[in-house]
Image (spheres, rainbow, N blue to C red):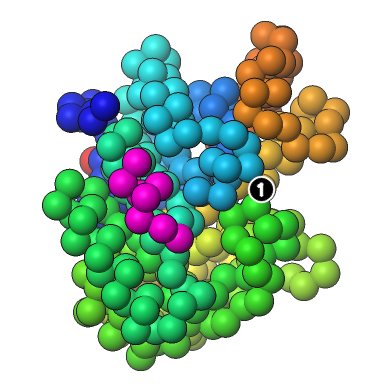
Amino acid sequence: MTRTTKPDNVLTLKKALEIAEVNRFAIGSFSPRYTPMIAAVLQGAQKSGSPAIVQISHKELIRYGITPAEFADEFYERLNTDHITVPVVLHLDHTKEPGPIQEAIEAGFTSVMIDASEKSLEDNIAISREVAEYAHAKGVSVEAELGMIGTTDFVETDKDEELYTDPEEAAYFVRQTGVDALAVSCGTAHGVYMVKQPKVDYERLRAIRTLTPVHLVLHGGSGVPADMVQKAVKLPDGGVSKVNIATDLELALLDALNRKERMTNKECLRLSPAQLALGREAVAETVVEKIRHVLNSEGQGHHF
């Protein structure tokens, strides 16, 4: 069923990032991965007075056994029951096909990401343009990816290969597609850094930002030192406005429960009330820590 009415504090990604960029902070795009942890992300943002993006990737939906409607329903339910008033965005991350994007928009997501970065440049442009036209007609923002962001855990993406984003190609890509935000490959990776350490290519970010006005997204924010992220956010003339954080939240949850292995969403739902409370507290604390010490977004909700 289409969710036609949304609370006033639920924004599109485009609107949220416009404000973040002007005021030189980044918005955390937090992936709770389990529906019971959506509440923890929202509570952490509310406690911090910070805007937040609640996201899940298509691959995460499959791995954890969740539908877009289930994720969206829990998001909107928690906004209401937990009296969340800070600005929020509901975002579908890495998605390679139009089907799940249409399903997410129908469920009430206000932002989607099409990731055709493994295709040729022209194919990526064609697919991303098609998604942008469809989503914009529904009042939904679109993020795309250019270059290839590596991974260490294969939860969000399939390949560990990294191909840095070319600034000239980025300018051409944005002109041709009309997307609202662009995930760029500049030295970070999805997952936990075990051997290779993150090293952000600030000159590349600067060049991309100079050539295109689109909002930039840093994927693989878990494990990246705070000073690296802050420098990327505060680049002259605008830097990164959205930082994705997923793995750190799951690690906080599992550590709190003394678990080493991931759960399915159904397993998480079967946790005792005491375990759920413990897990939510750990996730919310991680969200607050990222907001305060990495994103510079604490108290920034008043700009909206």
Q: Is residue 121 magenta?
A: no
Q: Quadrant of residue 206?
A: bottom left
Residue 284, x across and y down, in percent: 59, 30
Q: Please state which of residues 257 and 200 is positioned toward the viewer in this rendering.
A: 257
Q: Please state which of residues 158 and 242 is positioned toward the viewer in this rendering.
A: 158
Q: Is residue 136 above or below residue 55?
A: below
Residue 142, x across and y down, in percent: 30, 57
Look at the image and tell me whether residue 23 can be seen.
no
Q: Residue furthest top?
A: 273
Look at the image and tell me whether residue 118 can be seen.
yes
Q: Residue furthest left?
A: 137
Which residue is located at x 57 percent, y 71 percent?
A: 149
Q: Please state which of residues 221 and 104 is positioned toward the viewer in this rendering.
A: 104
Q: Quadrant of residue 167?
A: bottom left
Task: Please report the bounds of the magenta region as a residue range.
Answer: 96-103
Residue 257, x across and y down, in percent: 79, 25
- In the visual, does 286 lie left or right of 193? left
- In the visual, does 170 lie left or right of 245? left
How many numbered circles are shown? Answer: 1
In the picture, which quadrant includes the C terminus?
A: top left
Q: Secondary structure at mark 1?
A: helix
Q: Is residue 192 above or below residue 110?
A: below
- In the visual, does 189 lie left or right of 18? right
Which residue is located at x 42 percent, y 20 percent?
A: 78
Residue designated by label 1: 247
Callout 1 environment at 10 Å: few (<14), some (14 to 19), or many (20+)?
many
Which residue is located at x 57 percent, y 23 percent?
A: 36
Residue 156, x across and y down, in percent: 59, 55
Task: Identify the amino acid type marked 1.
Answer: Thr
